[in-house]
Structure formats: structure tokens, C-alpha cells
Image (tube, helix red, strand yellow):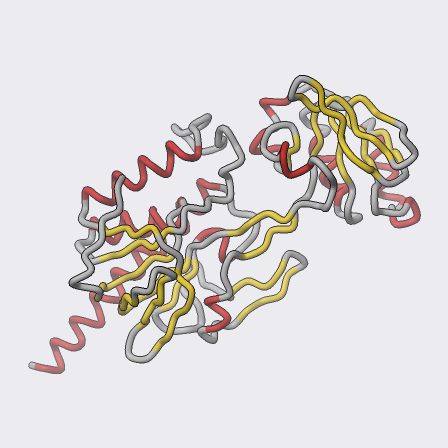
Amino acid sequence: MTETYDEADETYEVIVIGGGAAGLSAALVLGRARRRTLVVDAGEPRNAPAAHMHGYLTRDGMAPADFLAAGREEIARYGVDLVRDRAVDVVRDTDFAVVLAGGRTVRARQLVVATGLKDELPPLPGLAERFGRDVLHCPYCHGWEVRDRAFGVLATTPLSVHQALMVSQWSKDVTLFLHTVAEADLSDDDLRRLAAAGVRVVPGEVSGLTVADDRLTAVRLQDGTEYDREVLFVAPRAVPRTDLPARLGAEMTETPFGAYPVVDAQGRTTVPGLWAAGNVSGFAEQVVNAASRGYRSGAAINGELLMADLDAAAERR
């Protein structure tokens, strides 16, 4: 889908910041409800490194880029505008004024923030280059495709034990590299479960990866010891791409994975007219969940706008 944007009319009923699954889903509902809607998309989907996405019924195995392209085509059918740009600021008075990096300012009565997250990987040489290929983070996303291979798990917090136990569902050859975690940090329950799952525990810091013929072949420790591994699971730090909800005064909640806006079941924040959909409101949403949350927000927004317009019309009468 090419960019569709009318510079002559920069006022919308709803602006959606973020063109991923959540944002496009909200826009689709709003477009079908005949709401004048704009999607602002910087084109930086979180799952871009992955060749395929999984767990989305009827879309299992689809390339993320193809999924988003199909979504953009669908919203265009209902008159939704899309601009390839980045929202750099938002000012709220009687409505929301969204300042774009390209210099434009667009306004709307309601605002959906659906910018998602970005993954910050542990600072290990070679990790980023292989992320989404044989360096992975989610067994539900990739476990089936790499089943029964030799797994490694890079421990960066004691929570990495949980990841090692989870991936043992997909392979019985799992090695937990403690890396920056001390053996003393593992509880008795951790050790008992790791042993029951057959997970080998290797102390010592990892220095890098060994790659041959564009395949991960081993994990290398600081002392030079190499362990043959075909897949390495890591736990990236998921970071929200924008702080716009906080800057607009939305109540935030602190989690071990960062600060997220407090939302209700429809994605409504504590700021009237401001909505958060998808991973911008929580780190654990898969694509199918993000799309569902976007749908809920879109339907709730349409209902709010309808009632507000009817109340205003009743007052004029």
C-alpha cells in the first residue's frame, strides 16, 4: 500500500500512532465504522527479524511483512489514511495535536498509541546479527521450527531458569549458560526442576558465538571452551518505543519489564480520549493478542464518539 495522506485536511476523528497488528486492527474497525482515521507508521515492526510469525489462526507461518502489507491494503478499502512518519510529540487541549517528524501537525478527537516495543539484546558479539534466525527469544513463536535441536539458553537474570525449563518442552538437549548469573542465585527449586527437565547447567561467562556456513554451531565461554549448540535462546529487554502516554499524563505502572500505561479491558488510559493498544500496554502480547486489543479499542472509541455526538446534538435541540 502506498502512502495516502491529504495535506489539505489535517483534522481526523481518530489518529492511530503505530502501524502494527494492534494499530491496523483498530484502524480497520474505525474505518468500517466510517470514522475519519489516520495511521502514523514509522515502519519499525518488532518482529521484523523473524521470517515467519506463528500462533495466529489462519495466518500461521505468514511472513510479518506480508501480514502488515495485507493489513494496510484492508484499511485503505475503508478510507483510512496512512502516513509513513514518526510522531515526535503530542499536545492535548480540546483535542490531540500530533507533531510528526516530517514537520506536519495533525489533530484528532481521540488518539490510539500502538507503537509496540523494541528488543534490547544482551551485549554479546554476534547476537544481534543472528536474532530471529538461530538466536531466539520465544519458544511459542519459534519452538516448533527448531524442535529437537541442541538448545542453549543465555542466562542474564535468575528468571532465565524459567526460560530454560520452558524450552525443554521442544528439545531434550538443553544447556543453560549462567553467563552473568551466579550459581548461588539459583534456588533449590530451580536446581531441582532443571535436573528433572534434564537441563545441563554451565557456569562461566559467555564470550561469543561460533558460526559456520551461516549457522550457529557453538557457544564459546571466556576460557575458550566451546559447547556445540544449534540454537540459543535469550531474554531481550522489551522497551516501549515511545513515552507519549506518560508525557500526556497517563497513569503508569512499574513492572520488572518497564513502565506501562494503566488501561482497562478496552485499552482506555486514565487520560480521556487516549488509548493504548498492543504491546505498548504490556510486554507479553503476541500478534494475535495485539490485533484483538486493537479491535477492542477501535470498537470502544467508535462508541464513545457516537455517544458524545448524540449528547451534543441533544443539547443543541
- Residue 272 in the image: state x and y as whole percent: 37, 73
Question: Extreme left residue here?
Answer: 317
Residue 170 is drawn in which quadrant?
A: top right
Of residues 99 and 280, which is closer to you in this image?
A: 99
Q: Is residue 46 left or right of residue 172?
A: left
Asked if residue 217 is positioned above or below residue 96 in the image, the reply reads above
Quadrant housing the C terminus: bottom left
Residue at 75%, 43% (x, y): give it: 160
Asked if residue 200 is positioned above or below residue 43 in the image, the reply reads above
Residue at 46%, 26% (x, y): give it: 61
Residue at 44%, 72% (x, y): give it: 270
Quadrant housing the N terminus: top left
Residue at 37%, 57% (x, y): give it: 17
Q: Is residue 316 left or right of residue 303?
A: left
Residue 204 is drawn in which quadrant?
A: top right
Of residues 131 and 297, which is closer to you in this image?
A: 131
- Residue 131 in the image: state x and y as whole percent: 62, 35
- Residue 55 in the image: state x and y as whole percent: 49, 32
Asked if residue 299 is positioned above or below residue 56 in the image, the reply reads below
Residue 127 is drawn in which quadrant?
A: top right
Image mark count: 0
- Residue 24 in the image: state x and y as whole percent: 34, 47
Q: Is residue 129 left or right of residue 288?
A: right
